[in-house]
Image (cartoon, grey):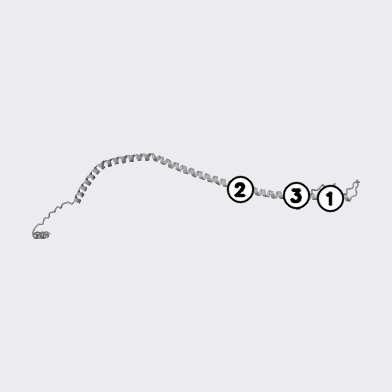
Amino acid sequence: MTAWLTTGADWLLQAAVTFPDTIITKQVETEASWFQQVTTWASGLASVALLVLAVALVPAAWNFRKSYAKVSDMLDRIYGDINPLMRHASTIADNVDYISTSVRVDIQQVSQTVAMANQKLVASVAAAEERIKELNALLAVVQEEAESAFVSTASTLHGVRTGIHEAFEEEEPIDGRYIENGAEWEKPRPRVKPRDDFAG
């Protein structure tokens, strides 16, 4: 390994010997343009402004931190005061919901009861109407039967009267009384106009 180091050192010495002189460079200063001068002044002013701003913002940030702590404490107190109210409001809302549901169910039951009563009333009215129709039919039949019985009774009585009258006319008077016409026996009949007179 030392052989390699000595070989490397020899090569470096040879390289140093080969350069005839040392090159020294010097930067030439050029005159600054007006844009570079303005940029330099603006950069300095910006640095000063940032420094002043930093000095002014540190107390403001400190005060903001204090204000934030106060606001946070106040919000915690408000939350502590409002939290029971919110729980009570939630309970009240639940109670109102329960009451409205109960009232809705009661109204539905009342509506169903009214509907059932209405159906029963309609059925009762229909049954009563049917019975009235049956009673009217019965009364019509009774009236027809009564009229028929009255007419048949009247015609039977008329026939009996006529028969008796005929029987007395053919008989010889026993008591000396002789009836020639049956005007005494018959009741006067009402005069009935023919139907042609009613047409006009």
- Kindly identify which residue carries mark 2: 122
Tell me the amino acid under the disc marked 2.
Val
Q: Secondary structure at mark 3?
A: helix
- Kindly identify which residue carries mark 1: 162
Q: Secondary structure at mark 1?
A: helix
Q: Quadrant of residue 49?
A: top left
Query: Which of 162/41 is in front?
Result: 41
Q: Secondary structure at mark 2?
A: helix
Q: Position of residue 70 (x, y in %)?
A: 32, 39
Disc 2 to disc 1: CB gap under 8 Å: no
Q: Position of residue 51 (x, y in %)?
A: 23, 44
Q: Quadrant of residue 74?
A: top left
Tell me the amino acid under the disc marked 3.
Glu
Mark 2 crowdedness (10 Å alpha carbons): few <14, some 14-19, many ≥20: few
The earlier-in-sequence mark between 1 and 3 is 3
User: Spatial distance from mark 2 to mark 3, Cα to Cα?
Assistant: 37 Å
Numbered tag placed on residue 133 in the rendering: none
User: Spatial distance from mark 2 to mark 1, Cα to Cα?
Assistant: 58 Å
Tell me the amino acid under the disc marked 1.
Thr
The earlier-in-sequence mark between 2 and 3 is 2
In which quadrant is the N terminus drawn? bottom left
- The structure residue drawn at horizontal position 84% and vertical position 50%, both measured from the top left corner, is 162
Q: Report if residue 89 is visible in the image.
A: yes
- In the rendered structure, the answer to whether residue 49 lies left or right of residue 4 reads right
Q: Given the current orientation, which residue lies at the most extreme front position? A: 200
Q: Position of residue 111 (x, y in %)?
A: 55, 46
